[in-house]
Amino acid sequence: MQRSFFFRNPSILVFIGLLAVFTLAVTLMSAGAGSGAISTSFVKTLGRTLCLCLVAIAMDVVWGYCGILSLGHFAFFGIGGYAIGMWLMYARTEEIVVSSLAGATLPPTPQEVSDAIGSQIFGVVGSSDFPAIWAFAHSLPLQLLAVVLVPGLLALVFGWLAFRSRVTGVYLSILTQAMTLALSLYLFQNDSGLRGNNGLSGLQNMPGEDLGQDVISIRFFWASALALGLGYVLFGWVVSGKMGSVIRAIRDDEARVRFLGYHVESYKLFVFTITAVVAGIAGALYYPQAGIINPAEIAPIASIYLAVWVAIGGRGRLYGAVIGAALVSLASTWFTGGGAPPIDLGFYRVIWTDWWLVLLGLVFVLVTLFFPKGIGGLVDLLGINRPVKQGRTGDYGPDVGAWRKREGEEE
Amino acid sequence: MATLLEVSGVSVTFDGFKAINNLSLSIGEPEMRAIIGPNGAGKTTMMDIITGKTKPDEGRVLWGEMSRNLLGMSESRIAQEGIGRKFQRPTVFEAQSVRENLQLALKNRRGAFAVWLRPKGPTDDERIDALAEEIGLTDELERPSGELSHGQKQWLEIGMLLAQEPRLLLVDEPAAGMTPAERQHTTDLLKRAAQTRAVIVVEHDMEFVRRLECKVTVLHEGRVLAEGSIDHVTSNQEVIDVYLGR
């Protein structure tokens, strides 16, 4: 069974192979485990990029395969980040507080330690009490559970309400965007209990272990690569075979799928929830490598970027989403980080930090108009990619339908 | 011949227009029934009501030995109960191969986890081969169904309908856009299907209906105008006035 699965989906094996080679190469060149040819900050950038690739394939499954243009998956990503960030911040602050109180004549009581941690974390929003939402922040296993459960449950409840009411298409997109916006606005408030617009910071430090950033960065890089590999196999499994057939059929004509006896809403809910969970895991790996998370990360624009990556990379194929996310996010780092040289037009100097979004928008429009299959569509030119190719033709439904009608009238 | 489906006193109004007006109809198992009527007679609306797409304002739709009411059920539940529907325009999943289309339709467990974790039954491939043979698409199994001709798509859809192993088939204008030879093949297929199950065929083409050799129900303005053999209804003066005379 397992062998035939990979045999029928050779692109999964190719992807895992390339990911392994890439991981090994970065490891050998990293400062933490190799020659040091790549700086620690760039290892972190690459690790973060892998997390973005993971959330992009989740987006591809929900949008490219199932046809649900969710503008909420970056919110799930952010929730995962907040969940792990709470533990990181709590545990790190606890270490500092305990070591600073160690010099006192009387050993501190647990209450004193807790108060000190509270005033350290919440001083910035003018408070020192732990809000209820931090009840489990002391426990890594519980917060890891939250990484999975909170996005999963939110997606389950939201999806159940939305799909049950048969909200589809652009209305569903607007609804998911409203959810994302509401969550982000809530987190911006100081009394949300998550430090308002300051967000959580200092997440790059690993509590309990005295490791340098070079070692921490390569470990997170490995974890991100592993998660991406596992996520790729999981989603490859979901979108292949009969399950994939049902999901793509829902994208192309959900009423017809209903008349075949499939409960479309359950399938959508399944896809929406499982992708939300994976998005949460991706976020939990991303933010420790970023070091900071704040509500701006969850704003709707982030989820729109996610859709743009998937569209540029190629909807309806998992490696397309990976290519799109990796290329666009790395290009974004290069252009906005001052890496790209400014272009002097004589009368105007194009400074890329200002013009990058314009360039991205232009690329998006051009890809949509002229390469609807995205960058991943180039793989079709090799002619080795039949199964996915079939899946892609669905997007041309209206055109094929017109042809079909013309043909019918000829008879 | 036991009654399989009983539509009784069903009415539905769209924006003040009575699309179905106190319609009653009963189908046995096995039985072939043709439903004819001019445009706007309520044929498609009637199918929408039976398959759960449209909820009527009043009336009952009773199904099976237990006389269960279909009106409270979702479309997918009704399909699982054994009602299959073929649309007027062929609606196959064009991006997917003929085999995938048939596999989707095969009567199997329909739950998401069942489909994901146990996608294939042991006899699925044989059933698909047999169906492909019956609808004449054996050589096209691996082709994307979007590449098929119009008539082949119609057959694929009929094949998908048979794959569901429904007790009641609702077939909307099966012969539309078919060549005479294809029509003959379709007639044979439907007649064979009607030996073991209930089949309702909605059709405009009187010649096609005549060849089905079955009881005919004439709909007009959302109600039953006449019912009986094709010769009986075509000699009915009211039917001639509203439908045949035009």
Image (tube, coloured by chain):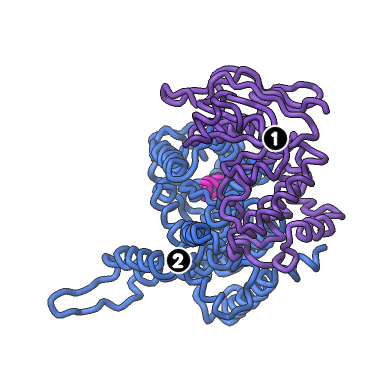
Chain colours: A blue, B purple
Chain containing mark 2: A
**Rendering coords of residue A312 (x, y %):** 45, 66
Find the distance from the CA under tag 1 to the CA under tag 2.
46 Å
- Mark 1 or 2: in front is 1
Q: Quadrant of residue A94?
A: top right
Q: Are marks 1 and 2 in contact (CB under 8 Å)?
A: no
Q: Considering the image in quadrants, where does the N terminus of chain A appear? A: bottom right
Closer to the camera in the image, B227 or A267: B227
| Crowd band around label 1 with a 10 angstrom C-alpha radius: few (<14), some (14–19), many (20+) | many
Q: Say which residue label 1 marks.
A: B33
Q: Which mark is residue A372?
A: 2
Judged from this view, the residue extending furthest toward the right is: B122
Residue flagged by tag 2: what amino acid is it? Pro
Q: Secondary structure at mark 2?
A: loop
Residue flagged by tag 1: what amino acid is it? Arg
Question: Above or below — where is B115 with respect to A210?
Answer: above
Q: Secondary structure at mark 1?
A: strand
Please name the residue shown 79% across and 67% down the image.
Answer: A4
Please name the residue shown 64% across and 46% down the image.
Answer: B208
Q: Is residue A24 magenta?
A: no
